[in-house]
């Protein structure tokens, strides 16, 4: 029987989170098999607030408010919302007409696109101060309708400053003007004005975070992980500390994914896969020795960073990470550790219950031979694209 799930579409932020989850399930290599997604996201949000795995190109954070503004020429709030949706679909054709392909949301689905840019980028608009308050797009159109009525009833001749005292639209008043050909031929290239605006907004919204620092302190080159950037040594100490914790967790927790798949291979009695994962475990142990990530890892500081970003993170999740780390420190071969096998088995049972593959033969049948084996990157590829768009605009100015 095929498993399904559903949710109530209460607001844009909840929809964005659920769409991220759906995206993860589309790629079996990224599924959070061992239940550390909340820790990963806490680190991602600490480093790069406002970013999302749903993002493609940075200029969407301008496209969305521009289309919202354009939709307000309709009469009612409902008509504005319908127009906004139509404009988001029109933007697809405009970007394709402008020569863009990579990063265009809906370049294949077109009118069947379900994950609209406004859903993907709504959190970024709030985190970076492009929308001033926490409201949905529907709320914006209701406000636009009410403001129009209020402006009509405001006596401008008797009180010339009355318009200045009207409530704001909810979008940043300094948003650059939309191009006149926005819906005819658009592209992702940022103008100098757009780059300056976005740099200021992101640096302000991510102040004290690595994202904000990288906006004003460019690195060079393409690097696989953020701890490889060439100017990290010049970053403030508190930022480098977070990056170091992310690097350590990235390395240490990967062993849990290897052991989980090894245990499944043993359960499935697949000798080829057993051999493969035992080799991977040996290579991982070598990586631990070379990187020395377990040495001097401050557990108290680590926990404070995670809980500061997400105070509601489940204590059992943190206990699993601590148990895994303690077990790794106590052995030189995770493949032969009954203690660590129990840690993995108990964690899967806790998060999956009756669907746990290590205890349910029926669930094991759905295992493809490898799952959850991608390394944590904390959305760095997305961030690298966004920063690249900013840096390129500066170089071309």
Image: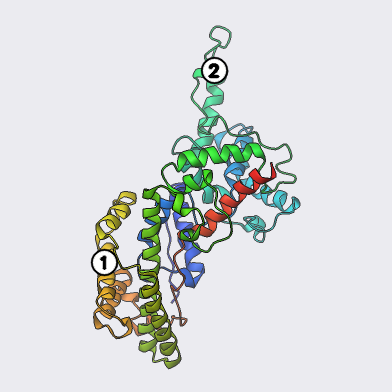
- Mark nearer the N terminus (1 vs 2): 2
Front residue (pair 90, 381)? 381
- Quadrant that contains the N terminus: bottom left
Label 2 Cα neighbours within 10 Å, binned few <14 / some 14-19 / many ≥20: few
Q: Is residue 228 left or right of residue 396?
A: left
Residue at position x 48%, y 65% in the image? 24
Q: CA distance from mark 1 to mark 2?
A: 58 Å
Label 1: which residue? Answer: 322
Residue at position x 52%, y 43% in the image? 216
Q: SS at mark 2?
A: helix
Choose mark 1 or mark 2, whichever is in front. Answer: 1
Q: Position of residue 285 (x, y in %)?
A: 37, 78
Residue at position x 42%, y 55% in the image? 44
Q: Is residue 231 above or below residue 72?
A: below
Q: Position of residue 8 (x, y in %)?
A: 42, 53
Q: Position of residue 266 (x, y in %)?
A: 36, 88
Label 2: which residue? Answer: 163
């Amino acid at each position: 029987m095929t498993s399904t799930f559903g949710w109530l579409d209460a607001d844009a932020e909840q929809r964005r989170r659920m769409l991220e989850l759906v995206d993860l399930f589309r790629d079996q290599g990224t599924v959070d098999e061992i239940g550390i997604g909340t820790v990963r996201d806490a680190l991602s949000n600490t480093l790069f607030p406002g970013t999302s795995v749903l993002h493609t190109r940075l200029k969407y954070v301008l496209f969305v408010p521009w289309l919202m503004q354009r939709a307000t020429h309709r009469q009612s709030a409902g008509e504005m919302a319908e127009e906004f949706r139509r404009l988001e679909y029109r933007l697809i054709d405009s970007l394709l007409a402008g020569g863009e392909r990579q990063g265009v949301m809906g370049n294949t689905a077109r009118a069947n696109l379900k994950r609209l840019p406004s859903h993907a980028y709504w959190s970024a608009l709030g985190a970076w101060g492009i929308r001033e308050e926490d409201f949905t797009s529907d709320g914006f159109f209701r406000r636009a309708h009410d403001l129009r009525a209020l402006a009509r009833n405001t006596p401008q001749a008797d009180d010339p400053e009355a318009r200045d005292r009207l409530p704001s639209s909810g979008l940043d008043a300094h948003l650059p003007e939309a191009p006149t050909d926005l819906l005819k031929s658009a592209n992702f290239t940022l103008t100098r004005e757009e780059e300056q605006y976005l740099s200021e907004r992101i640096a302000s919204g991510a102040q004290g975070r690595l994202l904000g620092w990288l906006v004003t302190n460019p690195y060079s080159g393409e690097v696989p992980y953020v701890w490889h950037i060439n100017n990290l040594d010049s970053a403030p100490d508190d930022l480098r500390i977070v990056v170091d914790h992310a690097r350590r967790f990235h390395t240490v927790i990967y062993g849990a994914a290897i052991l989980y798949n090894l245990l499944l291979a043993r359960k499935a009695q697949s000798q080829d896969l057993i051999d493969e994962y035992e080799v991977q475990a040996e290579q991982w142990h070598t990586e631990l020795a070379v990187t020395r990530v377990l040495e001097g890892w401050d557990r108290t500081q680590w926990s404070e960073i995670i809980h500061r970003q997400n105070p509601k993170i489940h204590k059992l999740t943190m206990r699993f990470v601590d148990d895994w780390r303690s077990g790794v420190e106590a052995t030189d071969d995770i493949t032969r550790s009954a203690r660590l096998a129990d840690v993995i088995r108990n964690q899967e049972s806790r998060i999956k219950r009756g669907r746990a593959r290590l205890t349910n033969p029926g669930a094991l049948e759905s295992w493809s031979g490898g799952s959850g084996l991608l390394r944590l990157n904390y959305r760095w590829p997305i961030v690298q694209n966004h920063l690249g768009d900013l840096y390129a605009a500066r170089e071309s100015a």
